[in-house]
Image (spheres, helix red, strand yellow):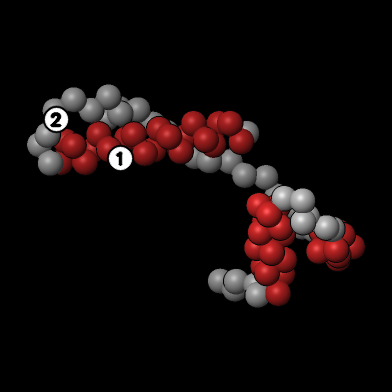
Amino acid sequence: MEGENAINDVFTKLRTLFKWAEDQELSRNNPFKHFKVKECVYGPPIYTTVDERKKVYSTDFSFDPALEKQRENYTRKWLFPIWK
């Protein structure tokens, strides 16, 4: 489903672009006018366990600074959850 969601996202952006061009009177051609874009489909969320979190936190990623940064961002989300 991830591939289909990516395609739907691109179609939505293209449809928005053509609609904008039409509204600005830059174009009268809107191939998405009669085209319906499917809704994105997401599965149930997958949560990490406390043990999995500890494993990620304690893993040494010093060999790759980009992975270290990702670990920092990932673990920061556990400490400061975003509430809706």
Quickly name the residue at label 2.
27
On residue 32, which mark appears? none
From the viewer's side, name the closer residue of 25 and 68: 68
Label 2 secondary element: loop
Q: Is residue 45 visible?
A: no
Q: Which picture quadrant has residue 77?
A: bottom right
Q: Which picture quadrant has residue 58?
A: bottom right
Relative placement, left or right, of 37 versus 82 is left
Label 1 secondary element: helix
Crowd class of label 1 (few under 14; some 14 to 19; many from 20; radius 10 Å):
few
Residue 40 in the image, given as x and y percentages of width and height? 53, 41
Quickly name the residue at label 1.
16
**Residue at the spot 14% in from the left edge and 30% down from the top edge:** 27
Relative placement, left or right, of 51 versus 78 is right
Indicate the amino acid at tag 1: Thr
Crowd class of label 2 (few under 14; some 14 to 19; many from 20; radius 10 Å):
few
Instruction: Give the Cα distance between marks 1 and 2.
Output: 13 Å
